[in-house]
Image (tube, rainbow, N blue to C red):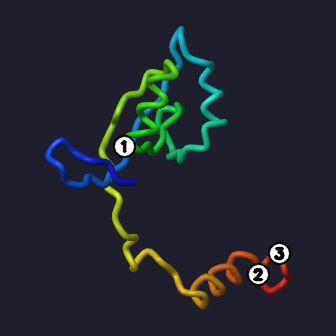
Amino acid sequence: MTDQSAGGGDVVMRFEATVHATTRSAELHAVDALDLDRVPDPEGGVRMLLGPDDLARLVAEGYEVRVQAVAPIAPLDPGLVSDEADVRAWFDGVTGDARGEG
């Protein structure tokens, strides 16, 4: 997601934010229909990863949005990606008892 900054350069980021219902917004469960990325919230609320347009849309719809952190968009660290053999070995280890191989 690319947004133009005031200086003319591209700013590539999303925002980690909590979303709260207000008197002029729909109930909080209505954010389920918005098809936005969620992340676990330690306080049990609704925490999402939002682009600038999504953030503006939620505010315009009356939700209170509290930005917790900026989450720059960057390529995935190759060290976090498992290859097919690693995944199959992990899966076989996890499901071995269920298949009677444990």
Eye-nearest disc, 2 or 1 = 1
- Residue at the image position 38 percent from the left and 40 percent from the top: 52
Q: Residues within 10 Å of mark 1 (few under 14, many from 20)?
A: many
Task: Choose the circle earlier in sequence order: 1 or 3.
Answer: 1
Calculate the distance from the C-alpha at mark 1 to the C-alpha at mark 3.
41 Å
Report the side of 19 relative to 35 (left or right). Answer: left
Give the SS element for disc 2. loop
Image quadrant in which the N terminus is located = bottom left
Q: In the rendered image, which residue does mark 2 sit on?
A: 96
Residue at the outermost right position = 100
Q: Is residue 32 above or below residue 100?
A: above
Residue at the outermost top position = 23
Q: Foreground residue, 6 or 17?
A: 6
Residue 54: x and y, percent? 46, 38
Q: In the rendered image, which residue does mark 3 sit on?
A: 98
The amino acid marked with disc number 2 is Gly
Calculate the distance from the C-alpha at mark 2 to the C-alpha at mark 3.
5 Å
Residue 11: x and y, percent? 26, 52
Q: Are marks 2 and 3 in contact (CB under 8 Å)?
A: yes
Which numbered dot is residue 56? none
